[in-house]
Image (spheres, rainbow, N blue to C red):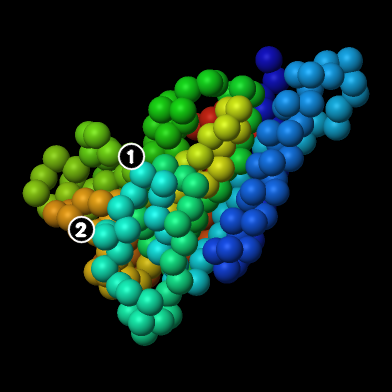
Amino acid sequence: MDSPLVHFEDWGLIAYQAAWDKQETIFKQLVDQKFDQRINPEKVHNKLLNQLIFCQHPPVYTLGKSGKLENLLLDEIGLEKYGASFFPINRGGDITFHGPGQLVGYPIFDLEQFFTDIHKYLRFLEEAIISTLAHYGVLGGRYEGYTGVWIDPDKPSARKICAMGVRCSRWVTMHGFAFNVHTDLSYFNHIIPCGIDDKAVTSLEKELGKKVDFNEVAQLLKTNIAKQFSFTYT
């Protein structure tokens, strides 16, 4: 079996709504194509590719469909004060923050080209982040019962470095992960991150105690995701 093909795009710094709209368009195209192939198997179809998108967002809080609004500790005036926006969205998970210096990844994959197991999908994304951290000598791990990547997950000092939340329909994924590279962590003071009120949030820069090259981190992670999922970039 040939390895799946993935088209990569870097959208740079992009407003959350604009990125969400673009994601939804790509996601719908993939889902519609799969549905059309099932009901019209004799038709010649132009095969749409899996996509991996990297980007950064201006300050924004997003709340997953299973989240609680009270985990946002700011009202409209507070959001305006800190220059942040807020979106309830259609991914899993609770509330999180996106902002400059955070590497956001949106894999829009047809998992039937990989494996039909959403838990395995999340573990693979986590492993790619863990491998990227290891390159910098930072030991990442998993916190039992939660998605994402953590530092010192088995200690009272456990802190989250990468949040995850996905949507999946007909085995096509969207949304993804948010990896704190050199994010302004003060924005997390205004939420209960992921609904967990007794754990801190960290970044790669904070763990290392020095600046890191954002583009270098992105390139490493891009490579590690391809290795983990055994796919080829077009």
- Which corner quadrant of the image does residue 96 belong to? bottom left
**Quarter of the picture holding the N terminus:** top right
Counting other residues with Cα less than 10 Å from the Cα at mark 2, is it few (<14), some (14-19), or many (20 or more)?
A: some
Closer to the chain start, of discs 1 and 2, is 1
**Quarter of the picture holding the C terminus:** top right
Find residue 177 and report its horizontal and vertical position in percent. 45, 48
| SS at badge 1 | loop
Residue 227's disc is none
Whether residue 225 is visible, yes or no, is no
Q: Does 1 sit above or below residue 136?
A: above
Count of residue discs: 2
Find residue 186 and report its horizontal and vertical position in percent. 28, 72
Find residue 68 and report its horizontal and vertical position in percent. 30, 53
Find residue 199 and report its horizontal and vertical position in percent. 18, 54
Q: Residue at x 39, y 32 (%)?
A: 123
Residue 147's disc is 1
Q: Does 233 sit above or below residue 106?
A: above
Q: Residue at x 73, y 26 (%)?
A: 35
Q: Nearer the viewer, residue 168 or 123?
A: 168
Q: Residue at x 22, y 34 (%)?
A: 144
Quick check: 126 left or right of 53?
left
Counting other residues with Cα less than 10 Å from the Cα at mark 1, is it few (<14), some (14-19), or many (20 or more)?
A: many
Quick check: 118 left or right of 189?
right
* Residue type, mark 2 in image: Ala
Q: Does 123 sit above or below residue 20?
A: above
| SS at badge 2 | strand
- Which corner quadrant of the image does residue 38 belong to? top right
Residue 200's disc is 2
Residue occupying the far bottom of the picture: 81
Quick check: 94 left or right of 219?
left
* Residue type, mark 1 in image: Thr
Residue occupying the far left of the picture: 156
